[in-house]
Amino acid sequence: MKYLTIALAKGRLAKQTLALLEQTGITCEEMKDKDTRKLIFVNEELGLKFFLSKTSDVPTYVEYGAADIGVVGSDTILEEGRKILEVLDLGLGKCRMCVAGPASARELLKKNEIIRVASKYPKIAKDYFYNKKHQTVEIVKLNGSVELAPIVGLSEVIVDIVETGSTLKENGLEVLEEICPLSARVVVNEASMKMQRERITKIVKDLKQALNG
Ligand code: PRP
């Protein structure tokens, strides 16, 4: 039997996904070892391989077929724009992609002024401002702690993930516009879906059942 390879995004989502997979009878004991530095794990019995990668790389591994299946947030899927099949919404890690900033920036958004937008997600930000709002903006790519940008005067607003809203609140910022809801998705390589359709759809179906059960 050919191995099916599953790519998981390092961190909380990988743990939640493994717990869900376990409910479907797919286990990987090796992966639970907190001290391991191993990157790839094998379940010989089920013919499955698992690996953990940086979140933003999951769609890349899946597009190139290095992984047949991936589990990753829809923020990353939108930002990476890879040619992959999205087959299931796991509803995990629910949050929102938003435009945020100080209350005073609300007027700037209304008036379609040329403003600076800082984000870890330049593609999502560009798509929103250019294609949806038809507002010309300057986008500045940051790699984290994006909430700092409007506070220190790097940008007027940010495009970022809002979960509880507490990071914004604690920094005197607020949601100004909502771009889209986000959650974790199961993605599949296009060729794998043709060649291994039966095995893949069984996993997806079992996951769906585990979510509903
Ligand atoms: C994410 C996101 C926000 C925060 C939102 O950051 O970029 O900063 O979580 O969560 P909240 O609405 O519940 O406060 P993350 O912790 O991933 O770190 P980062 O700042 O390095 O992106």
Image: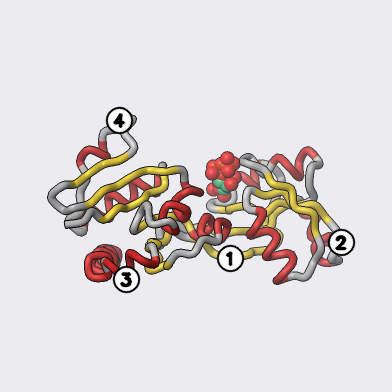
- Indicate which disc, 3 or 2, sits on the residue closer to the N terminus: 2
* Position of 88 relative to 152 (above/below): below
Q: Nearer the viewer, mark 4 or mark 1?
A: 4
Q: What residue would you read off at disc 2?
A: 113
Q: Is residue 12 left or right of residue 96?
A: left
Residue 196 quadrant: bottom left
At horizontal 20% and vertical 59% (from top left) the residue drawn is: 24
Q: In which quadrant of the rendered image does the C terminus lie?
A: bottom left
Looking at mark 2, is its residue's CB closer than 8 Å to ligand 1? no
Q: What residue would you read off at disc 3?
A: 194
> CA separation, marks 4 and 1?
36 Å
Crowding at dot 2, Cα within 10 Å, few <14 / some 14-19 / many 20+, comes out as: few
At horizontal 43% and vertical 56% (from top left) the residue drawn is: 64
Q: Is residue 96 left or right of residue 90?
A: right
The residue closer to the viewer here, 208 or 136, is 136
Q: What residue would you read off at disc 1?
A: 180
Q: In which quadrant of the rendered image does the N terminus lie?
A: bottom left
